[in-house]
Image: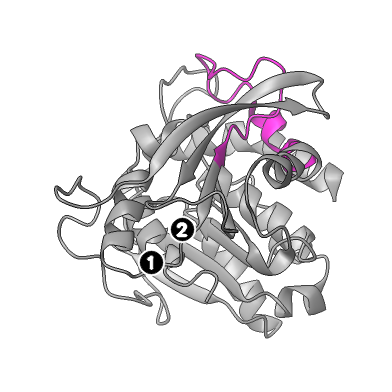
Amino acid sequence: MKNDIKLAATALRLSFALLLGISANAAFAQEPRIQGQGIVLQEDEKPAFPHAPEGYDKPRQGIAHGKVDTVTYDSKSLGTKRKMSVYTPPGYDKNKKYPVLYLLHGIGGDHREWTSEDAAHEVLDNLYADKKIVPMIVVMPNGRAQKDDRIPKNIYAGSAAFGEFDKDLIGSIIPFMAANYPVKDDREHRALAGLSMGGGQSLNFGLANTDKFAYVGGFSSAPNTLPPDKIVPDIEGAKKLKLLWVSVGDQDGLITVSRGVHKYLKEHDIKHIWHIDSGGHKPVVWNNDLYLFSQLLFK
């Protein structure tokens, strides 16, 4: 399993480069915006849910807002201190216990991507105002598991480090949250999801650890996603997930990655949601995924 993840991460640089038509050593400041040309949708490739309403990802006046804090924790696997963002919901009460969503970023981001490039806090605030989701804590860590975890000029340079992040997530972050926040610290109240590179991580790590996560989601998952015949090491465990979500935009050049996962899950009778969104490899798709996915959690 570990070798498979490392190989997938190593192949990511070339895969992205070929899709973008650029040198693998080209430098980018943010997540690649991969657009597909001439994508023909298959019969079962359609939205599983209607798109979110207008303004769902915009700040709304007159409602209660959650809080995003930057938190420092000790990484046992890396032997250093690392930062992550933690969103606590409106009306957060330390005397109550909350389920947790671990939300991972893409190859060009870090722990701030979901609240800077994307709009996780606005999406969640609006959902709470409309009473559509269960109150939860959302943890947005840095999935680049290396001592110097800053975003490099060449965003592909640290791709292999994403394949090591499960050690940090399971060995340090989850225990930190249990020790420092009022969380419901069990599988039934723990979800893992992410976009692009983080989508691949979520599928890889979530499906390999169904004893720790009951909800798993991959949004526009990148080529670091394990091959379909290796992504589910425990088919019976995967069938016990409360939610397995696989989605991608209808104009995303990486659609074949999610197609392969969906096909394998379908062939092995592993229940999952297969959602085709409208758009490319962009935040508008991931914000909508979060809007839809979060409403299905912990119910």
Query: The residue under label 2 is which amino acid type?
Result: Ile
Circle on res. 255: 2
Quick check: 157 left or right of 147?
left
Residue count near mark 2 (Cα–Cα under 10 Å), binned few <14, some 14–19, many ≥20: many
Q: Is residue 159 magenta?
A: yes
Residue count near mark 1 (Cα–Cα under 10 Å), binned few <14, some 14–19, many ≥20: many
Residue stretch in magenta:
140-169
Is residue 106 among the parts visible in the rendering?
no
Q: Are marks 2 and 1 in contact (CB under 8 Å)?
A: no
- Residue at disc 2, secondary structure: helix
The one nearer the camera, 171 or 29, is: 171
Q: How far from the left and from the top, in percent, is residue 66?
A: 37, 46
- Residue at horizontal 71 percent and vertical 82 percent from the top: 268
Q: Is residue 198 above or below residue 217?
A: above
Circle on res. 292: 1
The one nearer the camera, 101 or 223, is: 101
- Residue at horizontal 80 percent and vertical 79 percent from the top: 236
Q: Is residue 181 magenta?
A: no
- Residue at disc 1, secondary structure: helix
The quarter of the picture where residue 264 lies is bottom right
